Amino acid sequence: MRDDRTPPANPKATEERTPAAQGPAGGPAAPQATATRTAPAAPRAGAEQAAAGRPAAATPAAWLIVAGLFLAAFNLRPAVAGLGPLLEEVRDGLGMNGAVAGLLTSLPALCFGLFGMAAPRLARRLGPGTVVAAGMAAIAAGLGLRAASGSTPVFLLFSALALAGIAVSNVLMPVLVKRYFPDRVGAMTGLYSTALALGTSAAAAFTIPLADAGGGWRFGLLFWALTAAAAVPVWSAALLRRRAADRARERPDQRPAAAAPPAAPEAPLRLSRSPTAWSLAVFFGLQSTAAYITMGWAPQIYRDAGVPATTAGLLLALVMGVGAPLGFVLPTLAARMRHQGPLAAGLGACGLVGYAGLWLAPAGGAWAWATLLGIANCCFPVALTMIGLRARTSQGVARLSAFVQGIGYLISLPGPLLVGILNEATGGWEVPLAFTTCLLIAQIAVGLRAGRDRCIEDGD
C-alpha cells in the first residue's frame, strides 16, 4: 500500500512546492508556491490536487481522510492513559519491581522523542498516510501482544512497539492536516485534538471497568488494541481510493499537461538555528511536562488530601475530558489569530490558579482545580496548531513537527520524576507545586515568543 506517490512531470518537483501552503495567519503563500499554483503541471497524486485549482477538502475520499484522522487521534493516548489505572495489577501479574515500573512510566516520552525523529524520512519514502496506517497497525499489534505477554521484558518490548507507532503518528498528524486540508488547519486540528482528548479520557475512565468485566488487567489493556485496529482499514480504504482517482486522471485520452518550469533552488531548512523552531520545541516540552505531571501526580495529591480513590480517578477523567470541547474550538481560534502567544498565556494562567488551589485547598475545591488544569492542558492543541502555521509547506511542517515533538518530549522526561523525588524528600506537595509553578511561568514566557507570526522558511 502506497500513498500519493505519483511522480510529477518535472523530476525535481517535490511536495515542498505544493500550492496548498499559506502564511502563518492564513495570509498568502510564498511567491514560489503561487507560481506553482498557476503553472500547468502533469497529473499528480491526490494529495497535490490543489494544483488543479480545487480545494483540498473536495478531493476523492476526503471523508475517509477525516474519519482516519479522528480514529488515529483517538488511539494516540489509550496506550498510556489506560496503563496507569492498572499499573498495580500489571506489576503483581508480571512480578515487576518498582524501578522497572518507574521506567515504564517514563517510556512514553522517551519513545515519542526518539521514534518521532524518524517520521519525516518515512513520510518522504512512503507517504504520510501510509506511515500513519502502519503506525495504527503497530499500536494494535503492540497493545495486543503486551496484553498477552508473560514476562516483564516482553511487556516492555511490545509497549515500545505500540509507542513507536504513536510517535510517528504524533508527528505526522499536523502534516496530514496541512497536506489534505491546507485551508482548514484550525478546524481539522480541532477535530483530531478533540478525538485525542476523548481517547485519553475514555482510557482513564473505562479501563478498570473493562478489566473487571473481562476478568483481569489483560482484557483492560487488550480492548484498546481493538480500537487501534479499527483505524487501519479506514486508512487503507482512503489510500486505495486516492490511488484509483490518480489512475483515472492518468487515462491516455486526457490531454498531456505541460511540464512545470523548474523552481528556483531553495535554501535548506536549518531548524537547529531557527529561534522559532526552538521556541516551539521548548513550549511543547514544557506543556508536555505539565500534562504528564498532572496525569501522573494529581490523583495522588487529591488522595493525600483525603479525596477517595474513585473520586480522584473521576477528577483525572475530568482533567482529560475538558480538552474534548475546548480542543475543538481553540485550534480554530488560534488559526485566526496573528499572534497565538496571548492565547497560550491565558491557558497557562488557568494552570497557575489550578496549582494554587491544589496548594491551598486541594480537597475543598477539587472539581474547580481539575477543570482549570484541564483548560491549561489545552496548550497541547494550540501547540499543534502553531506547528502547522509556522511552516509554509507540508514537508516543512513534517520537519518542524519532528523537531518540535522530538526535542519537546525529551524535555518533558525529567519533570514527573523530579516531582516524585521532591515529594519523597519533603513529605508534602508544597515544594513540588512550587517547582511546577516555576515551570509553568517559563512555559507562558516561551509561549509568547513561539506564538509570533513567523515561518521557519523566512529564516526568522
Image (cartoon, rainbow, N blue to C red):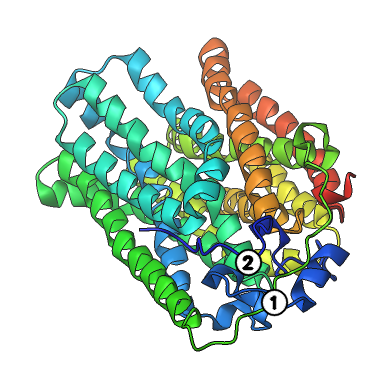
Q: Nearer the viewer, residue 19 or 352?
A: 19
Please tell me in which quadrant of the rendered image residue 411 appears.
Answer: top right
Instruction: Write the residue at 53% across / 72% down.
Output: 46
Q: For mark 2, what is the residue?
A: 9
Q: Nearer the viewer, residue 302 or 391?
A: 391
Instruction: Write the residue at 36% across / 50% down.
Output: 134
Q: Position of residue 402 (x, y in %)?
A: 61, 41
Q: Which secondary structure lies at badge 2? A: loop
Q: Is residue 165 visible?
A: yes
Q: Nearer the viewer, residue 160 or 204?
A: 160
Say which mark, if any, is on residue 429. none
How many neighbours does mark 2 have within 10 angstroms: few (below 14), some (14-19), or many (20 or more)? some
Q: CA distance from mark 1 to mark 2?
A: 8 Å
Left or right, 184 with reference to 322: right
Q: Nearer the viewer, residue 280 or 395?
A: 395
How many neighbours does mark 1 have within 10 angstroms: few (below 14), some (14-19), or many (20 or more)? few
Say which mark, if any, is on residue 258. 1
Q: Position of residue 113 (x, y in %)?
A: 55, 32
Q: Which three-letter amino acid code belongs to the residue tagged 2? A: Ala
Q: Which three-letter amino acid code belongs to the residue tagged 1? A: Ala
Q: Are marks 1 and 2 in contact (CB under 8 Å)?
A: yes
Q: Is residue 361 visible?
A: no
Q: Is residue 112 above or below residue 414?
A: below
Q: Position of residue 172 (x, y in %)?
A: 54, 51
Quarter of the image that includes the C terminus: top right
Q: Position of residue 82 (x, y in %)?
A: 33, 44
Earlier along the polypeptide chain: callout 1 or callout 2? 2
Left or right, 330 with reference to 102: right
Q: Which secondary structure lies at badge 1? A: loop
